[in-house]
Image (cartoon, rainbow, N blue to C red):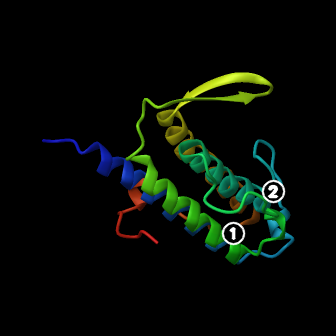
Amino acid sequence: MEIKTAETIDKMFEYNLWANVIVIQICSQLTDDQLQVQADGVYGTIRPTLEHLISAEGYYVRHLTGEFPWADEIDWSAMSMDELLKMARISGKRLLELASKSDPHSRKERLMDDKPYTYYNWTTILQALYHGIEHRTQIKVLLTKLGVEHPELAGWDFTGENYQ
């Protein structure tokens, strides 16, 4: 059996986009008070976590290409949930286009906390997947605290036919 690595990576990023869309759609139905729910051990309240998740995807695109998938200066907190969903689709589709086609051995350097940091494309791609799963899980914790049924986002729940 031949393993098709590029197709597998593409499916992982289809999943990432699908899961982001599902979470944002559910959260867009919450009230402003519900979006402010807090819990220990999570990044923050729901809205800032969503903003952080999607804006970070833009940085991953920039790490891979040198450019953001949108304008550099964005006021994330002023966006409607519909606009945030639009941004999630832009960054998610761009990551999908890039992930399996990026040279995993491409080495890059940047300053992190005023210190040089070396990373590779494969590191950025892995971080994009991990970061999304981590913050979507935190949002599910907050939804549970609210008593709101959260989506099933396990790999088993994604068939690949649900790509949005």
Could you say where residue 27 lies in the image, as x and y percent from the top left?
69, 70
Does residue 65 appear in the picture of this structure? Answer: yes
Q: Quadrant location of the N terminus?
A: top left
Q: CA distance from mark 1 to mark 2?
A: 16 Å
Among the 4 quarters of the image, the one containing residue 144 = bottom right
- Amino acid at dot 2: Thr
Could you say where residue 162 lies in the image, as x and y percent from the top left?
40, 70
The residue where tag 2 is placed is: 45
Discs 1, 2 touching: Cβ within 8 Å: no
Q: Residue furthest top?
A: 115
Could you say where residue 141 lies in the image, as x and y percent from the top left?
69, 54
Depicted 139 relative to depicted 148: above or below:
above
The mark that comes first in sequence, 1 or 2, is: 2
Could you say where residue 74 lies in the image, as x and y percent from the top left?
78, 62
Q: Residue at x 84, y 73 (%)?
A: 32
Q: Residue at x 46, y 72 (%)?
A: 164
- Amino acid at dot 1: Leu
Q: Is residue 151 left or right of residue 55?
A: left
Does residue 150 appear in the picture of this structure? Answer: no
Among the 4 quarters of the image, the one containing residue 102 = top left
Indicate the secondary structure of the residue bearing disc 2: loop
Q: How many numbered dots are placed on residues in this image? A: 2
Relative depth, front residue between 84 and 72: 72
The residue where tag 1 is placed is: 84
Relative depth, front residue between 74 and 20: 74
Indicate the secondary structure of the residue bearing disc 1: helix
On residue 62, which mark appears?
none
